[in-house]
Image: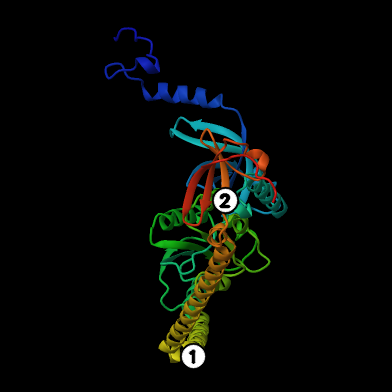
Amino acid sequence: MTGPQAPPATAGQTTRENPWPVRALTQRMTEYISRAPAAWVEGQIAQFTLRPGAQTAYLTLRDASVTMSLQVTCSRSVLAGLAAPPSEGSRVVVHGRFEFYPARGSLSFRVDEMHPVGLGELLARLERVRRLLAAEGLTAAARKRPLPFLPRAVGLITGRASAAESDVLANARARWPAVRFRIEYAAVQGLNAVTQLIDALTRLDADPEVDVIVIARGGGSVEDLLPFSDETLCRAVAACRTPVISAVGHEPDHPILDDVADVRCSTPTDAGKRVVPDMAAELRQVEQLRARARRALTGWVLTEQARLGRLTAATVLADPLGPIERRRQDVQVATERARRWVHTTLDRADRDLAHRRAQLSVLGPAATLARGYAVVQTVDAGTRTVLRSIDQAPAGTTLRVRVADGAVLAVSDGAAPDS
């Protein structure tokens, strides 16, 4: 007989010597998962299995944006309530809760309600995503970047061997034969489309040689184009450092990617024309610019030649020393004229001076004295006064008499009688 067994340890107390038996772990897992609340879940059916006569269907629900899936079980009665049986690729909304099966140690989401997501509901959800991205400014025209004039390499994301690939390549090479492409193939519809598109976009955006990225797909139904309206893909495009061109579907198609991309092209053909310049048009423009430059240069040369001709035809350039010689002669004439004028003026001044001297000699006191006249002055204490009246020279007054050749002193005897 064996002794009494010790109570099982808690999860934190298990050791190598004291482990849990499998039943203890599965029992606790069952209890823990049973307390999880029920939930509504949306996903895309990636796998659907319902064997004939079986009462349980097995499904795999996959997230449309990332690589994650969920194992789902559903009773036949739930499927019977649908208008049409679900198929792989369908979007559904299910209600249920997790269940743990101890016998197999497996976990599954048990569904008790299932509703297909209709086109109207899908469009409403897309419109909500469109408004959300617009509110965040991801669709604003101010953040859209211009395309490079001539990219070093063009990144192309499209389906393998698709018509969209052919349209982009053919039209781009027809416009610019030397264009280089780096092509990343990805699923453009279905379960793996969003994941592969994001991976391809990440690789191209990390390539420093790629200057522009084109995401191209041909036309299709709204359901086929749903990956290009996925929020995760749109945010990845908005976060790219490289300008992105959206070329999805035909003219009426308008996935959300068109709003987020830097440039929207109505078709892949249009993208092939937009991504590179037209070599023929550029060559024509180069020729036009060359012709314009040639005409401008020719016109400038002709204008300068005419100007040079006018300058060389001028008299001053035809005989550069002639004007100088004429000016020298003019200067000589003016100098001679000035010299004559100065001499004439001096001669006239000399004549006037001689005349004034002659007048002064005739009218001056010396000439008068020479004719016998004298100037009498009274001398009083060294002061001389011209005698003008006999009253100024009473007897005994000292007199100074000036004659032509000098002066003599005399003494007055008084006034002389008139006789």
Residue at mark 2 to residue at mark 1: CA–CA distance: 80 Å
Q: Is residue 185 above or below residue 276?
A: above
Q: Residue at x 66, y 68 (%)?
A: 251
Asked whether the viewer can see residue 50, the reply is no
Q: Is residue 30 left or right of residue 263?
A: left
Residue situated furthest left in the rendering: 17
Asked if 37 appears above or below 133 in the picture, the reply is above
**Frontmost residue, 300 versus 195:** 300
Q: Which residue is mark 2?
A: 375
**Residue 31 image position (x, y, % from top left):** 51, 22
Closer to the N terminus: mark 2 or mark 1?
A: 1
Residue 7 lies, in percent from the top left, at 38, 10
Q: Quadrant of residue 97?
A: top right
- Please, which residue is most extreme toward the top here? 3
Residue drawn at 38 percent across, 25 percent down:
22
* Residue 395 seen by the camera: yes
Give the side of residue 1 with respect to residue 159, left or right.
Answer: left
Q: Which mark's residue is nearer the viewer, 2 or 1?
A: 2
Quick one: 356 or 262, which is closer to the camera? 356
Give the residue type that dot 1 points to: Thr
Closer to the camera, 125 or 58? 125
Amino acid type of disc 2? Val
Q: Which mark is residue 64?
A: none
Q: Residue under label 1, please give it.
A: 315
Say whether residue 119 is left or right of residue 413: right
Position above or below: 102 against 290:
above
- Packing grade of label 1 (10 A; few <14, some 14-19, many >=20) is few
